[in-house]
Amino acid sequence: MEQARIRNFSIIAHIDHGKSTLADRILELTETVSAREMRDQLLDSMELERERGITIKAQAVRVAWKGHELNLIDTPGHVDFTYEVSRSLQACEGAVLVVDAAQGVEAQTLANAYLAIENGLEVVPVANKIDLPQADPDATAVEVADLLGDDPTQVLRISAKTGDGVAAVLDAVVERVPPPAGDPDAPPRALVFDSSYDQYRGVVAFVRVVDGSFSRREPLRAMATGTRFDAEELGFFSPTMTPVDSLSAGEVGYVVTGLKDVSRLRVGDTLTSVRRPASEPLPGYQDVKPMVFAGLFPTDSDDYPELRDALERLELNDAALVYEPETSQALGFGFRCGFLGLLHMEIVRERLEREFGLDLLVTAPNVAYRVKERTGRWLEVHNPAEFPREVEEVDEPYVAASIIVPKDYVGAVMELCTERRGTFGRLEYLSPDRVHLTYDLPLAEIVLDFYDQLKSRTRGYASFDYDLAGFKPGDLVRVDVLVAGEPVDALSLVVHRDFAYDRSRLLVEKLREEIPRQLFDVAIQAAIGSRVIARETVKAKRKDVLAKCYGGDITRKRKLLEKQKAGKKRMKRVGAVEVPQEAFLAVLNIGQSGRG
Amino acid sequence: MGTGLHPPGKTARGAALHQPADAPAAREAARRRLPEGRALEPARHLYVHLPFCAHRCGYCDFVTVVGRRDHHAAYVDALLAELELERASLAAELETVFLGGGTPTFTALPELLRLLRALPAAEEVTVEANPETVTAEVASALRAAGVTRVSLGAQSFQPRLLEVLDRVAGPDDVRRAVHHLRDAGFDNISLDLVYGIPGQSASDLDADLGAALELQPEHLSCYELEAKPGTRFTHAWGAELARQAEALEGYFERVVDRLTGSGYRWYETANFCRTDDAQGRDLRARHNLAYWLGRDYLGLGIGAVSTIENRRWRNTPRLGRYLAALAAGRAPEREVEPLDPGVRARERALLGLRLDQPLSLAGLRFVLDEAGLARMERLGLAVHEHETLALTRRGRFLGGAVAAELLI
């Protein structure tokens, strides 16, 4: 296909604004799939994606429309995957921005729209769900037009659900989105915007060819990682894999690499030919670093090998997942895992439990810290239990948070952000009723329950998005928890010095509730270094024996003893204290709102 | 059968029970002579269940039958028929017989006496009684029928608390019953008390203990009220009990302090006996001691449990089916539980740890958790020396949890 007849575009939207439904309608309308083959949200191939209604893995589908070749590149819709979104957008010349006409512009609408504009894309705005009785397409059109500096009449009115207006969207893509501009005769370059792992064929790279062309069997090289491989197969999705002999400038497709490890071919890398290599890679490659960390431990320590195997298999499909073995004195053998963000963590956990049938204990998440020791040496710490007790300086990751909220809740949101050590950025009215707030917030302050708090304090009306915004110094201290005098590594936490007292108090109170009474008094202490800042005592039981025990009671008494013994097995022993596994999650539930 | 019981004056001392090694050689010889196919060591302890009650108390979860006076004779017939069927499991000479209930003394007196006269002789014969059923006539009839010990269900001395328990007897009924029993010549009386009754304050408990001590019983059993799930009582009082749970926790210690301070021996978790007996008798309940020492016992009657060697069985709790089976000459329906040596050993340990005398570890080592034992010793809850194991005072209050630590 000549370049002038190719259009590469994405659909971008806030969660639940109808991106996947629009994609489904496009596949139907272009007869890429028959109605019989049509499944809702066809592009979301993982079971979990369909269930959660979100897209985790981007894919690209080629469709034919009025003599043109349209490549629809699906993007992940959540903040944790901003880097992947931006790589997908880099593979396009245009983006269809879908906004729910009943909801208006939301935080991810903004984030995605800005990302599209930054990548120089032509944005085709669409007000969706006009079939809903509460839809206000005109007001939505004004909001969207303001955002883009566009004319409200340019905003298409559609219902992806009924199919109304979808053809006009495709027409607008052909008319407004420019054709790809690469040089077909230059040394070949292709952007890897995603990859997946196939257990028989190895890593499959999703690529946008920018310059030149690639042929089957050609030896290739990934310019950032230096990885070499042969293109075992080239092709495109329609929506199933359709092999071709070559992919040329402007086209979108896949390359079967035969590589057995996704980490050897990273998203954002540039593929070129070994025989006729390009001199410069495409811009924008970043080594994505996980920012959120948590310990994953099998509930039953016998399942450790299964957890290790499962992580190895997940890693093949998820280049952003990192993990290393962790040994906790309280929780035994497990792994410390790094994630892009909270949703990513949740997805990994669910996949481990669902696809691999594992029963997991996940510790409270924490962020990555950069710590300067007294010796002057800098180290990166991913686990509070490894945070030095004496530090010279600490830097912690920050995010630029963007929150959209009805104006009545601005006060509540500002209060929350202030409690979380936020620095106010700006406030602007998107419409007379809706306000866009920006804050700089420490990532550590949002990993626990910020989103839940935001939702509850705004009755669910707030939408929230964030971008990582580098490291800043923070006055952070390590708090250790001691149970009966023994430090419990899995309960250590790193907090801002100003919050250390309140959070420690809440934590030890919570632990007192979670730890059952034992045969002796159990002190629960929180300490900074050797200074105890909070203390509770689980009082010893005074009595634990059945009063009556005669000939007819013996079996019952013995069974009770057996039950008591079975109950002990589910406990983790810390010194002489039996601690239920739930107690290790107490950090998750210290309801930071109690601080306010 | 029906050779009658030892006359009260000849009640043997319980030494044999407590020190089996000292058992007379003749008895050992008798055991060895047993024909093949019979239990190697037949049971020397017999329990007989008399389920009839005037009414059912709310907190009770025993097998009881309310009313049905017309069935008393048939029931005694059935008990004696079951005794005949199980005779092979019983030793020629018994150490103890225990008539429990229900309310044994609610059974029509002629039937109760017919039963007592037909049962094999034993050194200790105990009958449980509710105070309101103990008249002068009943007391002397029991004595004449060879009963050596009476266990009276006093429960409390405060009308308000007795009402909560649905008890019929008032405090004066208890006192009157004790006097009738003394007048009839009983020199071994036990009182049952219940503590932790909804609404019972610490001073209420002290008053109950004081009232019981005034009667100078040879033996006291003090039970914390167990609100068992599903009973009418729990339905009515569960919330109140949960509210006072923390206060109740100290009552057990209060009971032990008061009774041991008054010269009683706290010889089992819930049982106390006088140590100042003029005749120098060991006043522990010999029958119950047999349970705690892990001895075999035969139980007759509905819901009664027997444990003989590697088997435990429980008779059907249904009166009609029990009567029908025995009338037809068949054993009643039974739930049988096989007991392997490990189970018997664990039971022996957990029962033995309820006593104040050290538990001999001979034959019990294999069910002991050595790490748990070390922990319990460190916490000062158990003492292990010379192949015996004993719980400390605090260890006994926590006996259930401590046993769970000590046993595998």
Image (cartoon, rainbow, N blue to C red):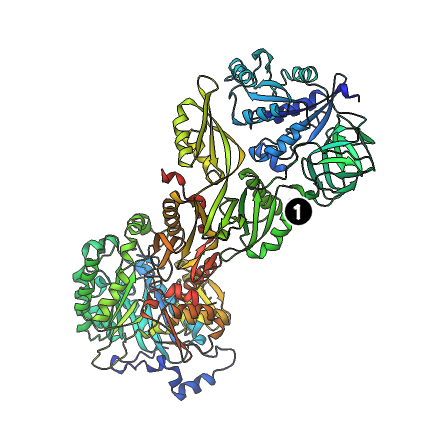
Pick whichever, A495 or A160, lies toward us: A495
Which image quadrant for residue B183? Answer: bottom left
Mark 1 nearby-residue class (10 Å; few <14, some 14–19, many ≥20): some
Q: Callout 1: residue from which chain?
A: A
Which image quadrant for residue B228? Answer: bottom left
Report if residue B390 is visible in the image: yes
> Measured from the top left, where is residue B165 in percent x and y?
26, 55
The kind of secondary structure element at disc 1 is helix
Farthest residue in the bottom direction? B25
Relative to A100, say whether B75 is above or below: below
> Measured from the top left, where is residue B400 in percent x and y?
38, 64
Pick whichever, B278 or B27, lies toward us: B278
Farthest residue in the top direction? A153
Residue A293 appears left or right of A227: left
> Measured from the top left, where is residue A143 in percent x and y?
52, 17
Q: Quadrant of the N terminus of chain A?
A: top right
Residue A88 appears left or right of A586: right
- The amino acid on which the numbered mark 1 sits, given as a three-letter code, is Arg
**Residue at image location 39% in from the left, 46% down from the top:** A500
Residue B264 appears left or right of B92: left
**Residue at image location 77% in from the left, 21% down from the top:** A3
Pick whichever, A173 or B180, lies toward us: A173
Pick whichever, B381 or A277, lies toward us: A277
> Measured from the top left, where is residue B167 in percent x and y?
24, 56
Q: How many marks?
A: 1
Farthest residue in the front direction? A376
Report if residue B326 is visible in the image: no
Task: Tell me the residue that label 1 is attached to.
Answer: A313
